[in-house]
Amino acid sequence: MPREQGRKVVSSNRKAHHDYAILDTYEAGMALTGTEVKSLRLGRASLVDAFGHENAGEIFLHGLHIPEYTQGTWTNHEPRRVRKLLLHKDEIRKIQGKLRDEGITMVPLQVYFQNGYAKVEIALARGKKSYDKRQDLASRDAQREISRAMGRRNKGMS
């Protein structure tokens, strides 16, 4: 059977862009068991409450919920186990340096399959304050209103 081509998104963290200011993103592989991969292929995963953590020169993902595979037997996995992320040493060193800064955290943005391999997109982010969130909403609304006005103007309406 030929390997899958392209990118198939399994789960995405839509609140991450609302709650955090994204500074930098990385693509990482995940060390998974067989039933976890089968469950992911069914499109079942949740990034709510998931975060990345550095420990002893390795990066781990905590809180990623991959439900148990329904046809799994005693070999089934634990849904919220800690999963190791597979990154190059240079990337790990960069992430370690940035995580030492005050207020920087690691959040997963997406879990997806890239050419048949399970990947996670992680981001180094800084938490937004409530006034930052309001400012972002206001600027987004203003931009939407500008684009509507430009569209009406281009169509010859007032």
Image (cartoon, rainbow, N blue to C red):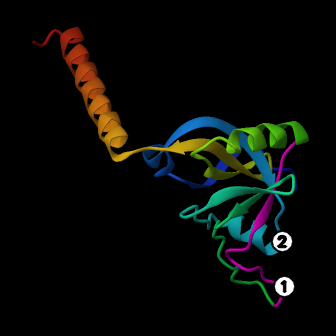
Label annotation for residue 34: 2
Q: Which residues are magenta?
A: 74-88
The percent coordinates of residue 75 (x first, y second) are 84, 85
Within-10-Å neighbours for mark 1: few <14, some 14–19, many 20+: few
Front residue of this view, candidates 123 and 147: 123
Number of residue marks: 2
Identify the main secondary structure in magenta: loop
Q: Looking at the image, do the residues carrying marks 1 and 2 touch, with CB atoms under 8 Å apart?
A: yes
Label 2 element class:
helix
- Residue type pointed to by label 1: Thr
Residue 156 is drawn in which quadrant?
top left
| Distance CA(mark 1)–CA(mark 2) | 9 Å
Q: Which mark is residue 107?
A: none
Q: Determine whether 36 is above or below 96 in the image.
A: below
Quadrant of residue 1 in the image? bottom right
Tell me what residue is drawn at x 86 percent, y 57 percent: 56
Judge from the rendering whether residue 66 lies leftward or rightward of residue 30; answer left or right: left
